[in-house]
Image (cartoon, rainbow, N blue to C red):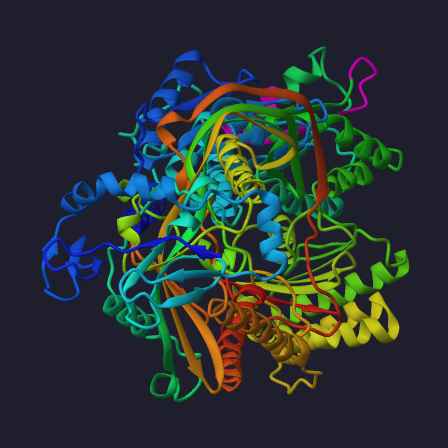
Amino acid sequence: MDKIIKTALCAALAVLMTIFGSALPVSAEGYICTVLDLSGVMELDEEMDLRNYLTTAANDIGCNIIVTYVRDLYGDSPNSYAQRQIFYYYGENGNAASLLICDDPAGYHCIELGGAAADRYSDKTEDILTEVRSALAADGYAAAGYKFAEALGAEQFYMDSTDPDAKTSTAAPPNRLEPSGSYSVVIKDTDGVINAEDERELTELLARAALLAKCNMGIIITDDLNGEQPRRVADVFLDEQFGADSDAIVMLLTADPNGYNWLSFSEQADINYGYKINDIFDAVYEGLAHGYVSGIKAYCAYFGVEKGETIQGFSVRLEDRDNSLTSSEEEYLLGLMQETANEIECNVGVVITDQLNGKSEKRYTDDFADESFGTGSDNAVLLLNNDTEIDYFSAFGKGTDLYKGYDDPILANVQDALKKDGFSSAVEAYCNVLTDIADGKEIEYTEYDYSINFDYNSERDGSILFDWVVPFVVGIAVAAMITAGFASGYRKKAPVSAKAYMDSGRTRVLNREDIFVREYTTSHKISSSSGGGGGSRRGGGGRSRGGRSGGGRRR
Amino acid sequence: MEMQSVTYQCPNCNAALEYSTNHGGFRCLYCDSEFGEEEIKKHFAENEQHRLEQADPALTREQREIEEFTGASALYSCPNCGANVICGELEASVRCHFCHTPVILTGRLSGEFKPDLIIPFSTTREVAKQAFKEYTKGKFLLPRGFKKNAEIVEISALYVPYWMKSGLVNIRAKATGKKIRTWRSGDTRYTNTKVYDVIRDMELAFIRVPCDGSVRIDDSLMESIEPFNYQGIKPFSMSYLSGCAAEKYDVPMEQAEKRINERISSACTEEVRKDMAGYSSVSVTSSEINYNRSAVVYALLPVWFLNYRFKGRDYPFVMNGQTGSRFGILPVSKLKCILMGAGLSVVIGFIAKLLGGLFLG
């Protein structure tokens, strides 16, 4: 009996320690941080300051911290890279949060978590990453590291470059991003090769591009560099027009036979776009084949400004990533979308894709909306998703005011049109239903039995079989086993083991060998959705991310 | 043929002495005199050995087989009343059917049947009865009316013959151990497996692992009231049998040893597996057990047998005569089983539905 009580007490103590121990930032050796500046983006003292802060932060929050800056992943996946950092430094199941700031063209910034950190932060990684990205864009690499720790819950030490009393980094921070995008654009046509009307149009397109690229933009067109190097001309123009510390891109287009076209980037713009310079020039040159105007339009298009798009009134964006629309359909739909956007006084976007690239439908749509119209803009965006076949509608600002709670009717109309007549009809139906709702009309649509869950947890068929029959069959099986167990105790008792007669004081281990034989690793893809069956919906509906609403629906 | 028998008589009045389970001594049935163990042993010491020596010489195997074949039983003459009484072939301690004097059949306790050790009874008949009542409490699957109608038919104290083996055991076990870890990167789950050959050599000591030496008594019944406390074990003396029934063994030592070896083997494997810690999974591929030293002894161990009758059927109940550990076969009500199963089904079904709703959304 004593043995039973002692065992029960030990078990209870172990449970309590597991529950509370994981919350205690206690370790015999303390928590540590690792800062790896593999890109050489920070000065030594800057790196040391960051490391000192992160060490304090790690003990503050009870979690090891790794921050890695890398320019080239050599084909490795960012998430694998970040995860491996945890294994290398803190072992399997190490309690650590790993941030990877990656400038590899095929990579992206990411956060991986291990051990207890995964339990604490796994549902906050997106938000933390958003804050880190903002800090990176606003104040640079070191700021991203500080913000990471702060977002994990450490005491604030974020270098706020607008606060005169705040500690500043040795690197000059670029301009802070303005949420609604108030960027400057300048087109300097020294030789008058573009007429006034084109220049006006190009200025508007360039302003749109500046908004999408989140930096100031300038274009110089000149036939004569006057013996200056194109780089110098562009750099001087950038400093003069936008300021030496501003975030800007300047493109020099010249017909000077001794010169060449040039792109100058400010420090931050260089981080964001410098590695894409060849792609930018490829696009520009394709346009330049048809003249400066086409070349500049192609330049704007590279940053997301679509052909035919205007920035008069409200913006529209139609992105067909799955080649589901013909050119003529795209042109027609863009016009229709523009009319709709002007009528509802809100930006309108549609994206068609067959690959969500690991993102949730909501995340994909929201990111598309931010990329297209900027964070904080009024918009209504539709995702036609040929990957998981869960279409999604997202709205922000005025879009939320107009369409909150209407995601189901909107998606129902779109999907009905899609089933009947294809993608073009679906987008057309989308525009029509947006207008009708804005006009206050009643919308007829086919209701589903279940609603799509905001978090996209696993699907359910919603049938009687799984709702009632399966649980009770499980109940009957378990009950039968329990009853049989009780009844068998009336007829038979487990025999006492011979261990009761063992003299444990004389037990000896004479030889112990553990010989390693081999090791192998297997992998399998984790499916992004489970269950199946069309027509099912999960619980949810309108929800917002700082003013955003939306919902999804399976076709 | 008539078997030699002996009774222990009161030094005061020559009436029969009985070993008292109450206070571990001897009591005279006639004058109520009480005597300690040592006192009686000393008083009868000269005679005990002489009696065992003078007892019928141990039968040869051939003679025993003839006796068994012809279903021979022993005929003895009661030392008290002189009556000729026939007893069963295994009984070694009985009561005279006529005068109820405890009689010990020395012939059944000599030679190869002479026990080495004995654990005297330390619980009484009343304790056994009470144990049965307590055992049936809280057993909600018992049929209706069990407590009222179950009738104790017989309670008897019996020294059960046991073979007990002690030994130093060497076990060499080989196993395949795997260490598995998984992690997720992006949308891929990785599983890393390390395979090891695990070898353990251990030496374990077992002290008196028992196996009952009676064919008619169910081994599983006896194993369910183990273990006995060997701190109470004593060298055999016939005096302890006075007043209690006893039987000689009819399971040969070799057969009992096989069963004991199986029990020891399971325990060794369990112990070795415990030492193979640190693996996600262990699969024992081979094990070899050798006995460095071993000894088998024959002992009489105390057990209360209680038979009760319910609805025309007899059920056994046994209690360890030393520790009080108990077990009995109880009837089960089918109706109550069905009701319990139905009730649990409903409750577990609802819980499964709720949990399924939580996880699946």
Q: In this view, does A514 lie above or below B345?
A: above
Q: Position of residue B336 (x, y in %)?
A: 48, 84
Give the residue at x 26% y 29%.
Answer: A165
Give the residue at x 35% y 25%.
Answer: A55
Give the residue at x 68% y 53%.
Answer: A528
Q: Where is residue A33 in the image (x, y as percent from the top left)?
A: 41, 24
Q: Position of residue A198 (x, y in %)?
A: 75, 45
Q: Quadrant of the C terminus of chain A?
A: bottom right
Is A237 one of the magenta-colored residues? Answer: yes
Q: Position of residue B57 (x, y in %)?
A: 46, 42
Work out whether residue B39 or residue A434 is closer to the camera in this orientation and state it.
B39
Magenta segment: A235-259
A421 on left or right of A477: right
Please say whether residue A438 is visible from this viewpoint. no
Q: In this view, does A160 lie above or below A127?
A: above
Please say whether residue B198 is visible from this viewpoint. yes
Work out whether residue B309 or residue A409 is closer to the camera in this orientation and state it.
B309
Work out whether residue A437 or residue B101 is closer to the camera in this orientation and state it.
B101
Is A206 one of the magenta-colored residues? Answer: no
